[in-house]
Amino acid sequence: MTIRIDSDILDSPLIRDLVRERETAAEARGGARSEISLLRRQLERRFGPLPQSALERLEASHPATREAWALCLLEAGSLEDVLRS
């Protein structure tokens, strides 16, 4: 595909798609950071400072796992109970 130099770069479907793809990825990363941050604060409020191993698991967790942990947090008796779910 050839892009004319005098055209607006965003007129190119290829460039437009790349920009959208990057924006979507950035939004997803931002959403994940927010989820991790919120869940961390909730866990710390309930169970006190988190050990490094819990922080590492939280950082590496999948969104579905974070959702399960957030729901489990409501009734869990310990941090271990949350992270086991």
Image: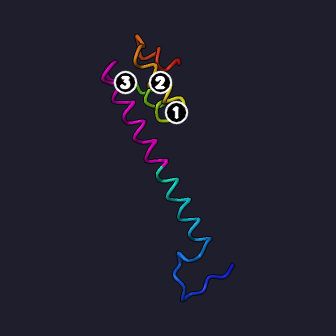
Is 62 left or right of 39, judged from the image as shown?
A: right
What amino acid type should be assigned to the residue bearing mark 1? Ser
Give neighbour class at mark 1: few <14, some 14-19, many 20+ (Cα, 10 Å).
some
Q: Are marks 3 and 1 in contact (CB under 8 Å)?
A: no
- Of label 3 and label 1, which has the lower sequence position? 3
Q: 3 left or right of 46?
A: right
Residue 51 within the segment the image draws in magenta: no
Task: Determine the residue positioned at 49% across, 20% down.
Answer: 83
Q: Which residue is mark 2?
A: 69
Ranked by sequence position, the earlier of labels 2 and 3 is 3
Q: Which mark is residue 61?
A: 1
Q: Residues within 10 Å of mark 2 (few under 14, many from 20)?
A: many
Q: What is the distance, in whole Å, between disc 3 and disc 1 at their CAs?
A: 14 Å
Is the Cβ of the residue at disc 1 closer than 8 Å to that at disc 2? yes
Kind of residue at badge 2: Trp
Residue 40 magenta-highlighted: yes
- Bounds of the magenta segment: 28-50
* Mark 2: secondary structure: helix
Helix or strand or loop: what does disc 1 sit on? loop
Residue 43 disc label? 3
Identify the amino acid type marked 3.
Leu
Mark 2–mark 3 Cα distance, whole angstroms, equals: 9 Å
